[in-house]
Amino acid sequence: MAQSSSALPACFSACAERLAFRNPGAIMKSLRGPPGKPGEGGAVKRAICETRVLCLLAISRLFACLLLLCLGAPLWAQDAPKDLVPAETSPAPPKLSALTRDTPAVKIIPGKIIRTDVDLALVNVTVTDPYNRLVTGLETDNFRVFEDNIEQEIVSFSSEDVPISIGVIFDFSGSMSDKIDKSRDAAVEFFKTANPQDEFFLVSFNERAELTSTFTNSVEDLQSRMMLTSPGGRTALLDAIYLGLSQMRGAHNAKRALLILSDGGDNHSRYNENDIKRLVREADTQLYAIGIFDPLGNRGRTPEELHGPSLLSEITELTGGRVFAVEHLNDLPDIASKIGMELRNQYVLGYRPSNHVHDARWRKIKVKLRPPKGLPPLSVYSKTGYYAPAH
């Protein structure tokens, strides 16, 4: 078995010669039998014997060839070149490295986003001038980022328009009856600022919050759904924000925002203000609000309704968003369009926190400006902090 394929045919050939061709004279002698008397047909007998010998030689050679084919082919195949091995023969699977063997498998679920912790904190920043107009064209050197009062090194910077996942939280409570048409117009103007890669969902609320539409790229579908809802009932604003942030967990884009259209105030939610503020801090989603507030003298007498404007301001400022108060209903579409443009023209600053401890604690963020010379005082809006990883 250890012989090479080239040595095998010679071995079997030698065996065959020893078996069939070593002593042809002996074979002829055995076939002729005892010698006859001269003249008794000796020539005929010799011719017959010679014919028999030739036949036996041919048969022996054929047998030797068959023997070579039967016994030599399996051994020759073992030593054949790799490129002549049949295609059906599969190579043995490679051995797993220690890293592959010890790494747990990850089940891939279609539609589910896979996230990895790259230890990079991202901060969306909006810059405005004294007239509340957006300021664009700033560079990395114009920004400073502080975490817990310690300046951080900015390692990434972007001001490009990127796809956004947006949830619209629409107030259909009874107090919105005379404002509902202009609010719908405002939502339509906001949708006009969308990009094809954006996705939206709709939460409508009165005395209960309801997911009217899951994520969709169809702005027309959202508009038609808003038209089918009529105002009435009390106001569960905090429940609607909770539902919107919960729905945002299924977003496909890294940048996320909620737009709230409401006249402020909450008088029918199961969740309280502290619950929502905690959730907002954890969600990494910017909140904007269009506050359609009644004049102070016309507001309801309940503390919740009086506290409505400040409630929306506190929640949105935590995320780097803000409230746009509406004094005239005709201004609603322009304000909604302005919010859409603001989301498209933000700076994104990235830094690796100098504090590497994973203690799940709240870390404060402060963004400051080094404005170019000649510009008036500028305002900066960014999220106020984040929770460190737990492990």
Image (cartoon, grey):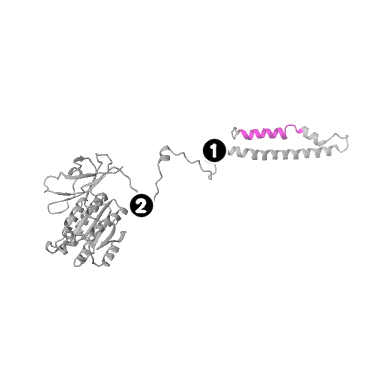
Residue 143, located in which quarter of the rendered image? top left
* Horizontal arrangement in the rendering, residue 159 relative to residue 17 (left or right): left
Q: Of discs 1 and 2, which sits in the foreground?
A: 2
Neighbours of disc 2 within 10 Å: few (<14), some (14-19), many (20+): few
Residue numbers of the magenta segment: 7-24
Tag 1 near tag 2, CB within 8 Å: no
The circle on residue 356 is: none
Q: Which residue is mark 2?
A: 112
Magenta span: predominant SS is helix
How many numbered dots are placed on residues in this image?
A: 2
Q: Which of the two residues, 229 or 272, is positioned nearer the viewer here? A: 272
Q: What type is the residue that disc 2 sits on? A: Lys
Taking the magenta stretch, the answer to whether it contains residue 280 is no
In this rendering, the answer to whether 191 lies above or below 102 is below
Residue 34 lies in what quarter of the image? top right
Res. 194 visible in picture: no
In percent of width and height, residue 98 lies at 42, 37
Q: Amino acid at mark 1?
A: Pro
Q: Is residue 12 magenta?
A: yes
* Residue 133 at x, y percent in the picture: 15, 54
Percent coordinates x, y for residue 315 in the rendering: 20, 53
Can you identify the residue that label 1 sits on? 81
The answer for how far apart the CA atoms under marks 1 and 2 are is 48 Å
Identify the residue at horizontal 30%, vertical 61% (top origin): 213
What residue do we see at 86% from left, 38% from top?
41
Callout 1 secondary element: loop
The quadrant of the image that shows the C terminus is: top left
User: Is residue 64 visible in this depiction of the protein?
Assistant: yes
